[in-house]
Image (spheres, rainbow, N blue to C red):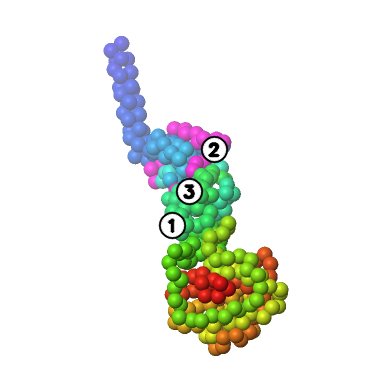
Amino acid sequence: MVIGIRSIVKFLTIIVVAAVIILGILQLTYKQTYSVSLNGEIIGYTRDKIDLQRRINNYITKGNGDNIAFVELKEMPVYTSCMLKRDVETNDDEIFEKVTTAGTTYYKYYAITNNNEEKVYVPSFSEAEDVIKQLKDKDSANKDKLGIVEKYETAQAEYKSVDTCVSELYVKKVVKQTSAYRNIGTQIDNSQTAAPTNIGVTLIKPVTGVISSRYGIRWRDNHKGLDIAAPKGTAIKASAGGKVIFSGSGHGYSGYGNVVVVQSTSNVVILYGHCSELNVRTGEQVAQGQVIAKVGSTGISTGNHLHFEIRYNGKAVNPQNYVYN
């Protein structure tokens, strides 16, 4: 009886020792790990399933912090405990790449809109803000119609640099040109009580006709000169001699149409506006009484007439103080 018990104990001891030896050999040869499967296919092995899954979860919900917003997965990875030979490497990075690329990637970027229409795209909000700021600093005509829209799409947009966006979106303001003929509020001498200024020049009538609009304040503006109505083509004579400093249209004389401007003295300039024809050129010297142009209705005009204007020291004065009185 005693011999039987001793035999059993000895046998069990041998089994335990053998098990310990086998486990030791297994621990030296194998390591505890997890196989990772996606859609039923093993894609790799990991030692730390918790850390790997946390990394995957963070990516699919938050993206990469740049222009990938998140990843949508149909299947999550499955982890199965297993023993792996110690000389076999785990591949967490490869598993991560396979899992994240198996889903649908949504990209985050920003559209800059003009009047609610998407125009250009940039990858970051700070770049979009910079574009808007630069356009406002440049006083772009569309600065109050610009906006920023955050986008989430499965394809990346064609991004452009900040400078390119600014260049493409900038709209130069169109400044409505105000006729020199009408914008004369600070250029006119409306003194009614003071004696007329002696401008040092004796003038003759440039044309014979009917005064249709006098110098000074009228219903639509301050009138710089004197309008003398006459048939189209009536000869216009130089009221005083001098040098033609301009013959043509525009170039600071917007609204006058075809105009001749004569510098009679260093202080006196005489202007003849709305002409149908010009008979002299810039730079010519003209004599008093010489035909320099013909009556017309060019520029801002409602009928054939001569706009006759005298400027003394840069300020318009009443022609009727010197002629047509």
Could you give the CA–CA distance between mark 3 and mark 1, rounded to whole angstroms?
28 Å
Indicate yes or no whether the magenta region holds residue 81: yes
Q: Nearer the viewer, mark 1 or mark 2?
A: 1
* Quadrant of the rendering where the N terminus is positioned: top left
Q: Nearer the viewer, residue 307 or 24?
A: 307
N-terminal label among 3 and 1 = 3
Tell me the SS state at disc 1: helix
Query: Is the C-beta separation of discs 3 and 1 under 8 Å?
Result: no
For residue 212, side relative to residue 268 (left or right): right
Q: Judge from the rendering whether residue 103 lies leftward or rightward of residue 209; answer left or right.
A: left
Residue at disc 2, secondary structure: loop
Determine the residue positioned at 52% across, 75% down.
322
Q: Nearer the viewer, mark 3 or mark 1?
A: 1
List x then y, in percent, for residue 220.
Answer: 58, 58
The structure residue drawn at horizontal position 58% and vertical position 57%, both measured from the top left corner, is 219
Kind of residue sitting beneath label 2: Leu
Using a 10 Å C-alpha cutoff, classify the residue at mark 1 as few (fewer than 14 neighbours), some (14 to 19) or many (20 or more). few
Residue 319 coordinates in the image, percent (x, y): 53, 72
Pointer 3 residue: 67
Nearest the eye: 30 or 227: 227
Q: Which residue is mark 2?
A: 73
